[in-house]
Image (cartoon, grey):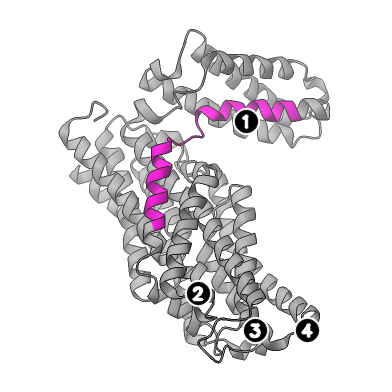
């Protein structure tokens, strides 16, 4: 397979299986985010709810694009994945996979809603930091701290957004909805009124779809890390991109940059423009005599991949400059052309997306009871009302959907749990929360990053000695 020897082939297959397992576990760990409200409001039977959620999770993986997946792969700089010893790359991948699976399974077993996003990102940061301890070049940062900061901020802020918006939405509902029965606990096993049930079904579907489009992409990004690390000659670049069109796009960028008057820019922005121009020229030289991306050598592909990533970062800085003397139309074209260059690095084969969609979809249908019980019964002291279920899921779906649009991974679990907590507080105040459950969730939230960073970093160093 891919020209690897039997040992590396076996390791590749193991890593792909582990990635499938991670996403499968993610499915049944996060099922409760979508189905808890429809189950506890008698809107759907449990088995119908989980099957329906699984289908829409899988659809979400296909429809979500790859922006979040690219964010995951961007956490580790290219240098970390270009170790000439492929066994070292395998050690890196196995360390983060095993860490993510252990933490996800452990929190699921204890019935604690925990962020799979935090788990995966902590694992990636751990191996990056561990790699920096043994790297020959100590002048390079082996963690993309800029991207890690963006992702960390989204993970930190999203629970507070979910909590606050749920309170606000509950207030709006109380002011606008005349039928006060939606604020009461269901007192029978009969389904709710049709209009309430319809809203809850829509929000359940929306959360399932949003979860697939966001969390599914994390699985896609994880598989791409595996493929780039172990078989870079095949997956470092998208070999299906037309080289002629790519060169034409690059020429258009060079022409636009030539119009910029450096004398009107401050020192910092002028330096950034020189850096950008140098990177564009390097990329142009790298592909000058190439006819297809797939025919380039492994080293050439990594050089191009690195240049494209750095070009995108530099272009982002230039577009933020007030001294970039291009018209608004040219700035729009410039941004679009740079996005076109990223098509060669920001991609995922169809089979990877199918694999993750199946893992997440089937995982959603299994093992859901533990977390559902926590979300439905243990966050608040009262039984979940129709209004609480609808408001918390509506907030979760919209928050996750927006995060996916901006390419930021968020924790579905944290957003929905905080939304339900907010809806409980909106009903009867803080006293309506169960302190023990909130404490367990908060502890898991605080510990996830440091524990996964230490565990994945330690496993990486151990596997480096073994492999």
Residue lying at the far top of the rendered structure: 289
Q: Quadrant of the N terminus?
A: top left
Q: Which residue is mark 3?
A: 425
Residue lying at the far left of the rendered structure: 6
Q: Residues within 10 Å of mark 2 (few under 14, many from 20)?
A: many
Whole-angstrom CA distance, mark 4 to mark 1, is 49 Å
| Image point (81%, 30%), residue name | 323
Please state the horizontal and vertical placement of residue 8, each as a whole percent of the image: 21, 36
Q: Which residue is mark 2?
A: 44
Q: Specify whether 410 is left or right of 223.
A: right
Please state the horizontal and vertical placement of residue 445, each as a whole percent of the image: 48, 69
Whole-angstrom CA distance, mark 3 to mark 4, is 21 Å
Q: Is residue 350 magenta?
A: yes
Whole-angstrom CA distance, mark 2 to mark 1, is 43 Å
| Image point (52%, 82%), residue name | 379
| Image point (26%, 40%), residue name | 12
| Residue 412 seen anywhere in this rendered image of the structure | yes
Q: Is residue 134 magenta?
A: no
Task: Name above or below for residue 157 compared with residue 130.
Answer: below
């Amino acid at each position: 397979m891919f020209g690897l020897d039997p040992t590396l082939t076996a390791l590749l297959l193991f890593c792909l299986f582990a990635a499938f397992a991670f996403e499968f576990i993610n499915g049944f760990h996060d099922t409760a985010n979508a189905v808890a409200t429809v189950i506890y409001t008698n809107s759907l039977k449990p088995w119908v709810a989980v099957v329906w959620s699984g289908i829409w999770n899988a659809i979400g993986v296909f429809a979500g694009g790859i922006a979040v997946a690219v964010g995951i792969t961007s956490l580790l700089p290219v240098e970390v994945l270009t170790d000439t010893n492929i066994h070292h790359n395998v050690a890196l991948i196995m360390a983060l996979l095993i860490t993510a699976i252990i933490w996800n399974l452990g929190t699921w077993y204890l019935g604690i809603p925990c962020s799979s996003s935090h788990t995966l990102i902590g694992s990636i940061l751990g191996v990056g930091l561990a790699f920096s301890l043994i790297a020959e070049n100590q002048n390079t940062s082996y963690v993309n701290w800029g991207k890690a900061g963006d992702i960390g901020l989204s993970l930190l802020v999203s629970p507070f957004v979910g909590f606050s918006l749920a309170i606000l939405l509950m207030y709006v509902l109380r002011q606008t909805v005349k039928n006060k029965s939606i604020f009461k606990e269901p007192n029978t096993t009969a389904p709710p009124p049709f209009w309430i049930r319809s809203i809850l079904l829509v929000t359940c579907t929306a959360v399932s779809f949003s979860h697939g489009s966001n969390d599914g992409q994390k699985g896609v990004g994880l598989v791409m890390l595996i493929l780039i690390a172990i078989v870079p000659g095949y997956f470092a670049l998208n070999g299906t991109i037309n080289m002629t069109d790519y060169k034409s796009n690059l020429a258009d960028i060079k022409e636009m940059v030539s119009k910029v008057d450096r004398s009107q820019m401050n020192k910092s922005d002028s330096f950034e423009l020189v850096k950008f121009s140098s990177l564009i020229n390097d990329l142009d030289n790298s592909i000058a005599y190439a006819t297809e991306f797939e025919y380039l050598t492994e080293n050439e592909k990594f050089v191009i991949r690195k240049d494209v990533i750095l070009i995108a970062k530099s272009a982002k800085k230039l577009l933020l400059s007030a001294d970039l003397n291009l018209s608004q139309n040219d700035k729009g074209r410039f941004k679009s052309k740079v996005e076109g260059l990223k098509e060669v690095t920001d991609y995922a084969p169809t089979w990877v997306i199918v694999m993750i969609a199946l893992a997440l979809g089937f995982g959603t249908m299994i093992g859901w009871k533990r977390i559902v019980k926590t979300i439905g019964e243990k966050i608040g002291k009262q039984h979940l009302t129709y209004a609480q279920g609808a408001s918390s899921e509506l907030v979760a779906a919209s928050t996750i959907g927006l995060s996916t649009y901006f390419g930021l991974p968020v924790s579905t679990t944290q957003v929905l749990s905080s939304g339900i907590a907010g809806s409980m507080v909106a009903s009867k105040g803080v006293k309506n929360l169960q302190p023990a459950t909130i404490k367990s969730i908060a502890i898991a939230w605080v510990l996830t990053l440091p524990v996964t960073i230490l565990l994945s970093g330690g496993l990486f160093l151990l596997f480096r000695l073994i492999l």
